[in-house]
Image: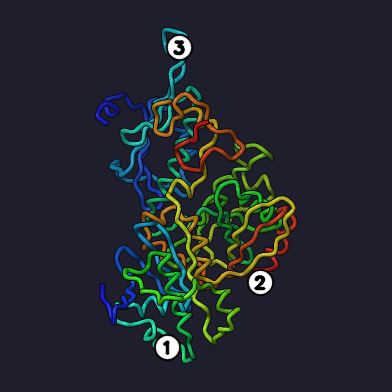
């Protein structure tokens, strides 16, 4: 872990990720966790700047230059918090003692309003192929032999009240 | 697999569907007609009998010398998918598994679990899981004059255009789980045939008594909404990430719960100019 004056420097994770830049946003897919993220411009700029060599102050300065607008360091910390929660950092930055947990709402309340958008990372978990398809019908499920994959071993399959899992070929047994 | 291969096969077919070569063989030639009805829309006979994926169906029925009823069996390669005395159940399992196989492995196409209609030569895509009310909304849009494209999959090509997947609609009666197949003509509608650009993506689900007050999402969030319903999101991630942004690039993406389908149909169609 790289350190500067005892502080670890944030480094973006690059392994097992697929990225796609679209205007104003960056899409990132985590091949390990099967989660997809949408980073807005600010979060994407911070993530791209995390090369393991820059301090948080330097990241804020770089963001300021890129966006041509003053940037409070707390904005960078908010982005780093979100990136860390999303497992998009290989090395996280050491948090200064006394820096409270940050939120978008908290920054707005604290009067930190800038010309740039506050960082935002949105996440979804992608489905398995079977989850994305229609579930099998109750009769089909019941028609499976006990020993078949997804068979209910003699127990009745879940009823039509929504308890039959949309999990392709497997039924949820009662 | 060798054991299954040794069984006597009375009929079979090799066909192509979305770039995949698939085979089906049956123990009773008279079952072929019903098998053909279950193949994905747009399938074509393959020129070669060599296939990448193989289904085998053993047709049951009364045994010759006793009153014992034999099981109908369905295999995919060497694995058994279904076993039932009711042939219809086995055929449904075949159709469901085959559709998923094609959606997950299709080459140069991304299958998003969604309802699709065409309106003013543009597509309205309604992604969502089963039981979210997609088919209900699609059927109401068709009754209002939109062209039917699919109630199951939005098939998106590399240019971001949506292709039809016009299987009969699977309509559920209230409080029932089973669906019955209804041809689009029975709703007074017609199916579209040309690929269309996406104009509107509506991420919604039915909630009793709700009023549709959708919020607009950014294109990136729109891609996530589609990706959350993409069959091959895990198996063909790069293709999905390259294709879906093209589909939403000139689309409006709206998200929010809705009440009755009748109440939102007009508002949805008005959004497509």
Q: Is residue B53 visible?
A: yes
- Near-viewer residue (B145 or B130): B130
Judging from the image, mark 1 belongs to the subunit labelled A
Q: Is residue B180 visible?
A: no
> Which residue position holds label 1?
A66
On the same chain, marks 2 and 3? The answer is: yes
| Mark 3 crowdedness (10 Å alpha carbons): few <14, some 14-19, many ≥20 | few
* Residue drawn 51% across the image and 38% down it: A136
* Residue drawn 37% across the image and 62% down it: A30
* Residue drawn 32% across the image and 74% down it: A11
- Near-viewer residue (B73 or A75): A75
> Which residue position holds label 3?
B68
Cβ atoms under marks 1 and 2 closer than 8 Å: no
> On the picture, is B147 further left or further right than B60?
right
On the same chain, marks 1 and 2? The answer is: no
Indicate the position of residue B251 as horizontal and vertical percent values. 56, 70
| Mark 2 crowdedness (10 Å alpha carbons): few <14, some 14-19, many ≥20 | few
Task: Name the front one of labels 1 and 2.
Answer: 1
For the residues labelled 2 and 3, the Cα–Cα distance comes to: 63 Å
Indicate the position of residue A101 as horizontal and vertical percent values. 49, 71
- Please, is residue B62 above or below residue B98 in the view? above
- Please, is residue A66 above or below residue A8 in the view? below
Quick one: SS at disc 2?
loop
């Amino acid at each position: 872990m790289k350190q500067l004056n005892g502080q670890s420097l944030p480094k973006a994770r690059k392994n097992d990720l697929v990225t796609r830049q679209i205007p104003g946003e960056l899409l990132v897919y985590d091949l390990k966790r099967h989660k997809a993220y949408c980073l807005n411009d600010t979060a994407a700029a911070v993530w791209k700047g995390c090369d393991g060599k820059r301090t948080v102050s330097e990241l804020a300065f770089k963001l300021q230059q890129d966006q041509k607008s003053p940037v409070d360091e707390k904005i960078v910390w908010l982005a780093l918090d979100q990136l860390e929660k999303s497992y998009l950092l290989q090395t996280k930055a050491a948090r200064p003692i006394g820096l409270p947990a940050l939120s978008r709402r908290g920054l707005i309340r604290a009067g930190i309003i800038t010309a740039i958008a506050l960082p935002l990372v949105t996440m979804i978990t992608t489905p398995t192929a079977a989850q994305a398809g229609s579930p099998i019908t109750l009769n089909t499920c019941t028609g499976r032999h006990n020993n078949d994959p997804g068979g209910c071993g003699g127990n009745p399959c879940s009823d039509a009240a929504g308890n039959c899992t949309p999990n392709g070929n497997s039924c949820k047994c009662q | 697999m060798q054991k299954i291969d040794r069984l006597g096969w009375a009929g079979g077919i090799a066909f192509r569907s979305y770039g995949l070569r698939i085979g089906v063989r049956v123990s009773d030639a008279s079952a072929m007609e019903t098998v053909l009805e279950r193949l994905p829309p747009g399938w074509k006979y393959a020129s070669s009998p060599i296939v990448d994926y193989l289904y085998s169906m053993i047709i049951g029925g009364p045994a010759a010398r006793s009153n014992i009823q034999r099981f109908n069996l369905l295999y995919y390669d060497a694995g058994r998918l279904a076993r039932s005395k009711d042939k219809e159940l086995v055929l449904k399992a075949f159709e469901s598994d085959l559709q998923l196989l094609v959606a997950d492995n299709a080459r140069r196409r991304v299958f998003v679990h969604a309802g699709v209609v065409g309106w003013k030569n543009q597509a309205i895509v309604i992604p969502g899981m089963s039981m979210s009310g997609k088919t209900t909304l699609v059927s109401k849009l068709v009754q209002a004059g939109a062209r039917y494209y699919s109630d199951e999959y939005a098939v998106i090509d590399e240019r971001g255009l949506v292709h039809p997947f016009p299987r009969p609609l699977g309509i559920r009666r209230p409080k029932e789980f089973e669906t019955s197949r209804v041809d689009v003509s029975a709703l007074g509608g017609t199916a579209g045939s040309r690929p269309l650009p996406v104009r509107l993506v509506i991420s919604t689900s039915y909630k009793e008594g709700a009023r549709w007050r959708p919020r607009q999402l950014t294109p990136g969030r729109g891609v996530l909404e589609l990706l959350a319903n993409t069959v091959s999101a895990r198996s063909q991630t790069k293709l999905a990430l390259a294709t879906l942004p093209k589909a939403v690039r000139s689309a409006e993406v709206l998200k929010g719960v809705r009440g009755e389908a009748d109440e939102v149909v007009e508002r949805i169609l008005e959004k497509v100019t």
